[in-house]
Image (cartoon, rainbow, N blue to C red):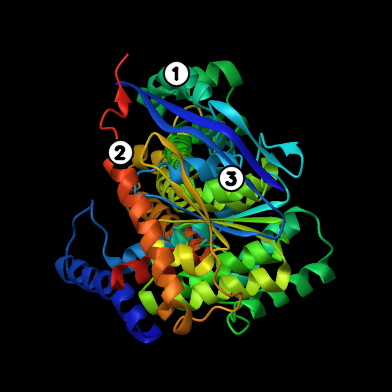
Amino acid sequence: MSTGKRIAYFLGLPILLILVWWAATLGSTNFYVPTPGKLVETFWRVWISNRFFTDFMPSIIRLFIGLAATIVLGVVLGVLIGSFRWLRSLFEPLLEFFRAVPPPVLVPLLMLLIGINDQMKIVVIISGAIWPVLLNTVEGVRAVDQVLSDTSRTYRITGMARLRYLVLPGASPQIMTGVRQCLSIGLILMVISEMFGSSAGLGFTIVLFQRAFAVPEMWSGIAVLGLVGIGLSAIFQLVERRVLRWYHGLREVQRDN
Amino acid sequence: MLSVSGLKKVYQVDAGEIEAVRNLTFDIDAGELVCIVGPSGAGKTTLLKCISGLLAPTAGTVTLAGKQVTEPPKAMAVVFQEYGRSLFPWMTVRDNVELPLKNQRVPRAERETLVNEALAAVELGHVPDSYPWQLSGGMQQRVAIARAVAYRPQVLLMDEPFAAVDAQTRADLEDLIRSIWKKLGVTILFVTHDIDESVYLGQRVIVLSNSPTVVQEDLAIDLPDERDQLSTRSSARFGELRGHVYEQIQLAKSKAQTGAVRVK
């Protein structure tokens, strides 16, 4: 697909929906649904201001730290658990238990244990976002091809070299699947972590607007979250295309045969 | 050079035990090209895994250059049948060939020379930056051979390496193995289920019995050293030898015990 066509496909439906929205709110005086024009104007006023530094950036920085820690921790633990059968048996019940606990219910608990600070918010993000990374890494590591593994052994590629040249690249398609899932969970938890006992941040601001019946402002906050989501996905795709170039090529060849 | 003595391998399964290899003893001298041929299910792959140190035998020993094999030895390279699964799909052809050398901490300049020579030897000097999956099956297996060659092993083990390529490619690859063997003076142990291939390639053919496996016959191949797909294969002696090996295999099959699985 050409670049022009791709951009057209990417923007086509959003533009159409905005047009519908614009037509539906034409001459409307509904307090709860602002017109597109009003929203853009509010968006500009609310977010391209001091709030960008006091609420937007701190949230985004916490999100990125949280996601980076999630990915590193998830991959490291996943490789360990995936590599050793006894470790897997040992951890299985524990993982099932913690995975079943919805992370939002941990927020009050973590507030008590860690305090109301950045660390608590980052831990909330990690506690929920780590599961897809961890579990996918475990599966990816376990599924490393037997012949490839034998080949590595006969060439005495062991230890860290084995990890670097065989295990991590072999598991990378599944790791990337986990990472993709963890991004949206991380975003949700970033918001939730700021909804209780907070005094700044995206989540806090949106809740503040809700309580103050500042409806267009609340909508603009939701729009910010959506845009952050698009940004994360764009970064992910950029990285994924580089890391998994071989995988997509291989899959294409296999499909053709 | 390579000595297999009293080798026995019994697998433990839920239903009891499977005796894959009962008692194998043979020696291979340095620089020999020996083929091992046997009916399918004769435990050829098990034998090869024990020799390469990937699998611990239940009894008996494998000795390479006077040292007992307990893990994959440095002086040995293995070429597997499944070329598609033995090359790293995330690395280019060059990186695949280079990796074992890098892992052995061979200096960069020397590595470069070895990789280029090996790729040239298998006539793949023109595709170093392709990925394995962009190549045909025969070419992929040549990459695996180049990787083994660049590693400079004393012993090269090959586990039915050409079973999954088409007949013409196969003939080319057989000649490639003969030429590499002559050029490098490497010891080759070539496992196959193809009788013609074993006679065409080997100086010696070891015929295995059906499972549980023993050596059925150890046959010297007295064909001239210069072999040619056309004249060698159509010679009278080639016909006699392949006929003989064929008979031995049939004999091995008829002696086959059906009770390979013994329930405890």
The residue mark sitting in front, 2 or 3, is 2
How many neighbours does mark 3 have within 10 angstroms: few (below 14), some (14-19), or many (20 or more)?
few
Residue A55 seen in render: no
Query: At label 1, which amino acid type do we have?
Result: Leu
**How far apart are the two marked residues, 2 and 1, measured between alpha carbons?**
54 Å
**Tag 1, which secondary structure?**
helix
Residue that label 3 marks: A68
Return the mark for residue A94.
1
Is the same chain shared between marks 3 and 1? Answer: yes
Residue B9 seen in render: yes
Return the mark for residue B254.
none
**Between disc 3 and disc 1, whose residue precedes?**
3
The residue mark sitting in front, 3 or 1, is 1
Circles 2 and 3, Cβ within 8 Å, touching? The answer is no
Query: Which chain hosts label 3?
Result: A
- Foreground: B148 or B136? B148
Query: At label 2, which amino acid type do we have?
Result: Lys
- Describe residue A127's horizontal placement relative to residue B16 as left or right: right
Is residue B79 shown above or below A164? below
- Foreground: A182 or B58? B58
Which quadrant does the C terminus of chain B fall into? top left
Is residue B57 shown above or below A25? above
Residue B4, horizontal then vertical, whole percent: 61, 39
Residue that label 2 marks: B255
**How far apart are the two marked residues, 2 and 3, measured between alpha carbons?**
64 Å
Q: Residue at x 77, y 72 (%)?
A: B112
Residue A240, horizontal then vertical, whole percent: 49, 61
- Foreground: B19 or B14? B19
